[in-house]
Image (tube, rainbow, N blue to C red):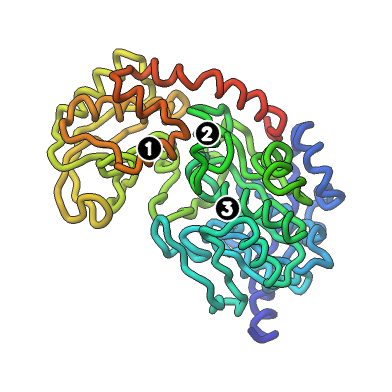
Amino acid sequence: MSLSRRNLLAATAATSVMGATAMTGEAAVASAAYGPTGTGAPGAGAAPGAARGPHPRPRVRTGFDRLAADGYALLAGHRVGVVTNPTGVTSGLRHIVDVLHADERVDLAAVFGPEHGFRGTAQAGGSEGSYEDPATGLPVHDTYGKSGRALADIFTRSGVDTVVFDIQDVGARFYTYIWTLYDCMVAAVLADKRFVVLDRPNPVTGRAATGPVLDRALASGVGREPIALAHGMTVAELALLFNAEFLPRAAGRPADLETVLMTGWRRSDLFDATGLPWVPPSPNMPTPDTALVYAGTCLFEGTNLSEGRGTTRPFELLGADGIDRHWSAAADRLATDIGLAGVHFREAYFAPTFSKFQGRTIGGVQLHVHDRAAFDPVRTGIALLITARRTWPGFAWRPDHWIDKLTGTTRVRTMIDAGAGVDEVTTAWQDDLADFRRTRRKYLRYR
């Protein structure tokens, strides 16, 4: 990449200014590690490309927007690598790697790609490999599926001394980016690297943690440590929890961690309240509506039913060959009987273009969430599993018991097989969930 292109990128970028939204007391304490860069005057040190342009300023300022507004003081004198994907954008939709690369104040040396890849082209369970980014000329290192010393060696070979994480999460334990965060934190300790987390909203709110807590005996790439299925935290809050609760055991000591919090985000905010642009975090997460149901309906990955991959409404459409109106009718009756709020189930027929039942017309249900505040995705997912098993003779769990990895427990599968109802299944995890909620409270940084 020539100097002239860097200058051109910088000259044509928009400018960001520091938001005036006050943080809560807890947030101010957490941001202390960020130092004076979190308290600069509006506009001080505004970074080229950080984002005004023709776009209205969102109510929420992300961690990156705050970092940029402070002139990247937190990165000064450091050789930087960034763990990110297509969601790492400014409010003006410029990718942060392009912005950082164009700014002479930042020594950006490498990019690290998670599942689906840095540019987000790979399907579930895949990555883009390692390559030179054609837009910036930077080396992109494939980190998907790597952890521990193997990942630490990648950080060491890259020549960076600070690793920055900026990826949009969707709030479910089995969405792999939070475990990319965890694995990178562990690797940063092993490689003696500094670690910086730039915060973004939990798009399905941070009001509560729900669902079963992972049993460590079932740890995998979709759940390394005992947190709730729907954790109700942001990535920076999770990083603080990981660092204090899990890294001393996993890496021998906590990471040298800095978190850059948002301003303007409230725990009750759904994504559309933030004013931020939605960029699909993965190919089958096209809208915030997908994220809203995902913590419950992704459980169907553990069955022989389609979870809607290969349709325009993944995780909102569920079905299989041989299912008809009886499932949606049973789900509606159960929803009424147990007070399952906020959702209706429509009889639906669809033909996935890939994944399960590719090219075949199948029947099932579509979820229609009509009250997002009342909707409980995990309880809804359990209700749908129970009614699918009762109404469709062809129902089966995946032979590898993937459902146990997704739920983090064997009890959901065994209780459903034994004929348990929704409330019996969900009651079984309440003690573990209460313990996690107590731990979680220590790391929450927004009201």
Q: Which residue is mark 3?
A: 180
Q: Residue at x 28, y 51 (%)?
A: 311
How many angstroms separate mark 3 from mark 2 (CA)?
Answer: 17 Å
Q: Which residue is mark 1?
A: 403
Query: Mark 3: which secondary structure?
Result: helix
Q: Which residue is mark 2?
A: 214
Q: Residue at x 30, y 29 (%)?
A: 384
Residue 391 vertical placement versus 359 (above, below): above
Q: Are marks 3 and 2 in contact (CB under 8 Å)?
A: no
Q: Residue at x 33, y 46 (%)?
A: 314
Q: Residue at x 71, y 68 (%)?
A: 156
Q: Is residue 437 left or right of residue 123?
A: right
Q: First in sequence, mark 3 or 2: give its number.
A: 3
Task: Give whichever of 243, 169 is nearer the camera.
Answer: 243
How many angstroms separate mark 1 from mark 3 (CA)?
Answer: 21 Å
Foreground mark, 1 or 3, reads 1
Query: As shown in the figure, which amino acid type bears the numbered disc 3?
Result: Thr
How many angstroms separate mark 1 from mark 2 (CA)?
Answer: 12 Å
Q: Quadrant of the N terminus?
A: bottom right
Task: Give whichever of 362, 11 is nearer the camera.
Answer: 362
Query: As shown in the figure, which amino acid type bears the numbered disc 1?
Result: Ile
Task: Give whichever of 56, 44 is nearer the camera.
Answer: 44
Task: Tell me residue 437's x, y (percent).
Answer: 62, 25
Task: Tell me residue 157's x, y (percent).
Answer: 68, 72
Task: Tell me residue 108's x, y (percent).
Answer: 71, 70
Task: Tell me residue 177's x, y (percent).
Answer: 54, 50
Query: Mark 1: which secondary structure?
Result: helix
Q: First in sequence, mark 1 or 3: give its number.
A: 3
**Which disc number belongs to residue 181?**
none
Query: As shown in the figure, which amino acid type bears the numbered disc 2?
Result: Leu
